[in-house]
Amino acid sequence: MTKILLVEDDPFIAEIYTKKLGNSGFETVNITSGRAVLKELKEQNFDLVLLDLVLPEMSGTEVLREIRHNKEYDQNLKVVVFSNLSSPEDREQVIRLGANGFISKTEFSPSEVVAEIERLLRQFKEQQKNSAVEALAPEERVSLGKKILL
């Protein structure tokens, strides 16, 4: 089961997405503050973090910066920003800081958010497979038993 850390301080929004994600087969843990995210990431493993930018104690950008620059955290952890702040500048900043994606709360319904998360998870899985194949020596790639004619 895919485990998602939902970082959302608004209880109403958190409840909606926790239920929606749960009904779609995801295990979801909700955290409401930036510092609590960092603590939780040291205690549990997650497949994905949905990170709001506006949080108490520590902003989402500060959390993202800490996750990406501190080797105590899994550097392969997928972090998707999930925020109302969705200007091109906001998007560019978080991608520069190491976010793996961006979902605007205002542009998607809850069902569309789940579909987008599923799409992103498939994309991340394919990227991981491709990276593993690219890491192989050419002679090892041949032994995978797949041929492509261009």
Image: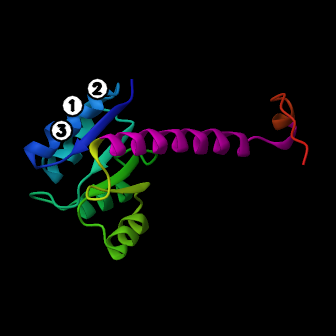
User: For the residues marked 2 and 1, what is the alpha-carbon distance in whole angstroms?
Assistant: 6 Å
Identified at 31% across, 36% down, the residue is: 4
Which class describes the residues within 10 Å of circle 3: few (<14), some (14-19), or many (20+)? few
| Measured Cα–Cα span from mark 3 to mark 1 | 5 Å
Quadrant of res 5: top left
Q: Quadrant of residue 52?
A: bottom left
Q: What span is in magenta?
A: 111-139
Q: Tell me residue 101's x, y (percent).
A: 42, 55
| Residue under numbered circle 2 | 23
**Residue 19 got which mark?**
1
Provide the secondary structure element on which disc 3 rests: helix
x then y, percent, for residue 13 = 15, 45
Quadrant holding the N terminus:
top left
Q: Residues within 10 Å of mark 1 (few under 14, many from 20)?
A: some
Q: Quadrant of residue 20?
A: top left
Q: Amino acid at mark 2?
A: Asn
Residue 32 to residue 143: above or below: below
Under circle 2, the secondary element is helix
Residue 99 vertical position relative to residue 20 in the rendered view, above or below: below
